[in-house]
Amino acid sequence: MNFLLRFLLRIAITIVMMVLGGQAGAVGPIDPSGTWLVEDGRARIRLERCGPSRDRICGFIVWMKEPADKRGQPYRDSQNPDTDKRARTLLGHQLIMGLQATADGRFAGDIYNAEDGKSYSVSLWRESADRLKLKGCLIKLLCQTQTWQQTLDVQPGQLIGLTGDLNGPRADKEWAQVPAPKPMQAKAK
C-alpha cells in the first residue's frame, strides 16, 4: 500500500511539474511600443498599448515625409470604406488595429492600408532592440516582410502629443482608451 501511495504521489508531482514547466517556458512577445521608421522612409509609426485592458498594440502615423499634396493640402483617407473617415488626414490616423499577443512571441491582427482602403493580416515582432519585423499578408501565400528601425529623435512636423491630445494622433473610436472604472465606495453599515 505504501508503494502504491508513493507511486501515485510521483505521478501527481510529475504532472504538476509538466504543467508548470510548460507555462514557465512560454514566452510572451517583447513590447514593441515606440516610434518606428518604416522601411522605405516615408513615414514614422508610433506603436503603443491600447484597448480597455491595454493588452493590445495599436499604431498611428505620427510623421510623413510628404504630408501634403502638390496644392499644399494634407493627404486624406479618401479610399476608406467608412465614409465618415474619408475626410480625416493621413497624418495622425490609426493604421494598426489592436494587435493581440500570440503564443509564438509576436503580435497579430490587422493593418489598414490607406492607399487602397483595405485591411490586411499582419504580425510584428522585435528582431532586436532597435529593429522591428512586420509581416503583412493578403492571403497566407502572398506575404511581404519589412524591417522598421526605431527612432528616438523628432522630425519637423512629427506628432509628439499623447494619443487623442491636440498635437497627437487620433485613435479610432473602437480603440480609444476607455477610462478606468471608478472605485466603488464601501457601504456603511
Image (cartoon, helix red, strand yellow):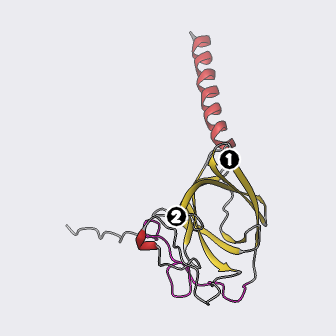
* Magenta portion: prevailing SS class: loop
> In the displayed structure, does residue 133 sit left or right of residue 137?
right
Residue range highlighted in magenta: 154-178
The C terminus lies in which quarter of the figure? bottom left
* Residue 165 screen position, x and y as percent: 51, 84
Horizontal side, residue 187 vs residue 3: left or right: left
Q: Is residue 173 visible?
A: yes
Earlier-in-chain disc, 2 versus 1: 2
Asked if the stretch drawn in magenta spans residue 79, the answer is no
Mark 2 element type? loop
Could you tell me which residue is drawn at 64 percent across and 31 percent down?
18
- Pinpoint residue 155: horizontal percent, then vertical percent: 72, 86
Residue 174 bears which disc, if any? Answer: none
Snapshot quadrant of residue 146: bottom right
Question: Label 1 belongs to which residue?
Answer: 142
Above or below for 133 versus 12: below
Q: Amino acid at mark 1?
A: Leu
Q: Mark 2 or mark 1: which is in front?
A: 1
Q: Nearer the viewer, residue 138 or 71?
A: 71
Q: Which residue is mark 2?
A: 54
Residue 179 seen: no
Choose between 178 and 36: the one closer to the eye.
36
Q: Quadrant of the N terminus?
A: top right
Residue farthest left in this picture? 189
